[in-house]
Image (cartoon, rainbow, N blue to C red):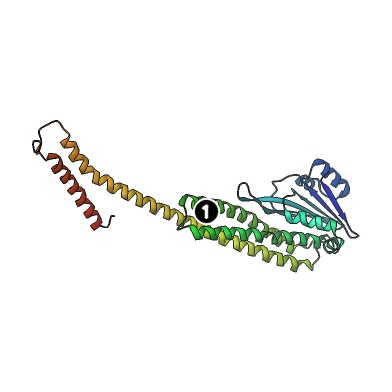
Amino acid sequence: MTTFELRTARFNWINIVMPTDADIDRLRGMCPDIHPLHLEDLTSSIERPKVDEEDSYLFVVMHFPIWDADHRISRQSEVEFIVGRNYLVMAHDGALKPLVKLFARCELYEKDRQDLLGKGSGDALYVIIDKLVDYLFPMLRKVDEHIHQIEDGIFTGDARQIIRDIAIVRRDVIALRRVIRHQVPILEALEKTEHPVIREEMEDYFGDTIDHMLNARDIIDEDYEVISGLAETADTLVSHRINEVMRVLTVISVIMLPLTLVSGIYGMNIGLPLQEHPQAFIVVAAIMFFIAFFMLTYFRYRKWL
């Protein structure tokens, strides 16, 4: 079993990690008022964020990011809440550190348990969501640090590595942006809900959490604009460097063309001027050198070099 419980005089906090069919069957017996479709949703990891209002409870699905160090990208982790009058069900995959730490502290310390669970399920839902929202900001600070590192090295660092770093950070920013933007309507719905399990006084508290989420959304939107600008700058720098290389190669090719023509002509087995001259090689080499020197001088005059 992966179902854990914390009981108080007011309600029961049920924490389900990686829900299985056995966990759902047990929950069905503990909370018979939960709709079968919502019980089925607890085992799904592809639910979109939403708030469903039932007569006796709220069903809330939210997504929060977790850092995948192996692939260097933030991935979304789904958490479902079922908030009733005398119970709070929380189902997740165990990857969200704030949830794991909060439940562990409430298990160990009576004071933390009373602080969280002493006012009812609606208040406990607010505290849990607020901690998950606050957990976004350390992740956003790391993104900002990575962007600053790219800014510092974009003109002096290795172009290939810079482009690779930009691509990785840009992918992470897009993933975070997708997760954060979808949570704002959920919090707004919780702020405006008039369901009995959410006290009217909680509107201001959820409003404060919305402000934090909007702040996080503004930060990630700004990061998206910055990393997009850095990507364009890197593309421009790479294109400029390629153009410089192509210009040098073109100049070398153009200079070699008449030299190749002269050497090809004098390589033919026919009678040619200066063929019998004792210094023919030196004369032809001098002509080729003069052609090359004249072309280089002309290119420098036109500022092509």
Residue 55 in sight here? no
Q: Residue 285 in the image: x percent, y percent?
A: 17, 43
Label count reads 1
Q: Residue furthest front?
A: 278
Relative placement, left or right, of 234 versus 91 is: left
Relative placement, left or right, of 119 versus 292 is: right
Residues 242 and 202: in front is 242
Q: Residues within 10 Å of mark 1 (few under 14, many from 20)?
A: many
Q: Which residue lies furthest to the top in this view?
A: 269
Q: Residue 270 in the image: x percent, y percent?
A: 12, 31
Q: Residue 69 in the image: x percent, y percent?
A: 63, 49
Is 194 placed above or below 286 here? below
Q: Quadrant of the C terminus?
A: bottom left
Q: Residue 150 in the image: x percent, y percent?
A: 52, 57
Q: What residue type is labelled 1?
A: Ile
Residue 201 in sight here? yes
Please name the residue that numbered disc 1 is placed on.
Answer: 166
Residue 125, image quadrant: bottom right
Residue at figure coordinates x 13%, y 43% from the top left = 283
Residue 2, image quadrant: top right
Residue 195, image quadrant: bottom right
Q: Quadrant of the N terminus?
A: top right
Residues 205 and 299: in front is 299
SS category of the residue bearing label 1: helix
